[in-house]
Amino acid sequence: MTHTVSPAAIAPAGSDEDAARADVYGLLAHLFYAPPAPGLLAQLRDAPAAAPGSMLEASWNALSACARDLGAPAVQAEHEALFGGVGKPEIYLFGSHYLAGFLNEKPLVRLRDDLAALGLARDPAVPETEDHIACLCEVMRTLIAGPDAAVANLASQREFFAAHIQPWADDLCAAIVAHPRARFYACAAGFARDFFSVEAQGFDMLG
């Protein structure tokens, strides 16, 4: 799993809707996997405002404002405080925790089966299990922007999102927003929650 994000990833709108969606998934994968580098924070600070009246307007603009208020060291410390540390983290980023109450449970087994069916697998160099929210966002980016139309299509996106992100993403975002030490990541979680809501509505419209 790679975690590089192009400058386009910081603008949740564009002439190519699928490219913009893929970029947002890439951005979320980057933000939740590791604290953003100073360059990405600078891009977030200078990012254009979201389209007025859009469902992402308030949360995107709040994330950009938070990037202006906090420097890279503060965001790095926040990421470590919320998601890192030795032993139990303050907030888990793994789907099994929210779906089954424990890590490495049946939801992870089902996820691995679905990934295998799509011809996808975790990079052995990545220590996190596949149900990490960043890994799931990377999969969605692949299903949107990948070169193989047999895998990268709306049907695969809808099925994967409904099975492996939608059932628990709101709980994760709510836990982050409610945490007293979350500032930047409260904004990131608010944006993620709104983006996932837009995705769910879009998939529902497909019937």
Image: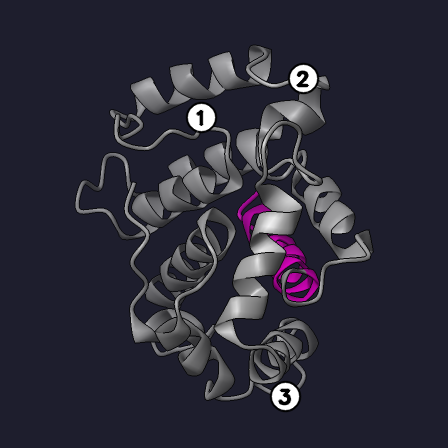
Are there few (<14), some (14-19), or many (20+) residues within 10 Å of tag 3?
few
**Residue at the (69%, 40%) spot, across then down:** 91
Residue 196 seen in this snapshot: yes
Spatial separation of the CA atoms under disc 1 and disc 2: 13 Å
Disc nearer the start of the sequence (2/3): 3
Give the structural element (helix, strand or loop) at label 2. Answer: loop
**Kind of residue indicated by mark 2:** Phe
Disc nearer the start of the sequence (1/2): 2
Spatial separation of the CA atoms under disc 2 and disc 3: 41 Å
**What segment is highlighted magenta in the picture?**
186-207
Q: Which residue is mark 3?
A: 52
Q: Which residue is mark 2?
A: 102
Q: Which residue is mark 1?
A: 129
Q: At which x and y percent is residue 4? A: 29, 58
Q: At which x and y percent is residue 58? A: 69, 78
Tell whether label 3 touches label 2 (CB within 8 Å).
no
Q: At which x and y percent is residue 108? A: 51, 18
> Which residue is at the far left?
147
Q: Quadrant of the N terminus?
A: top left
**Residue at the (47%, 21%) spot, across then down:** 111
Q: Quadrant of the C terminus?
A: top right
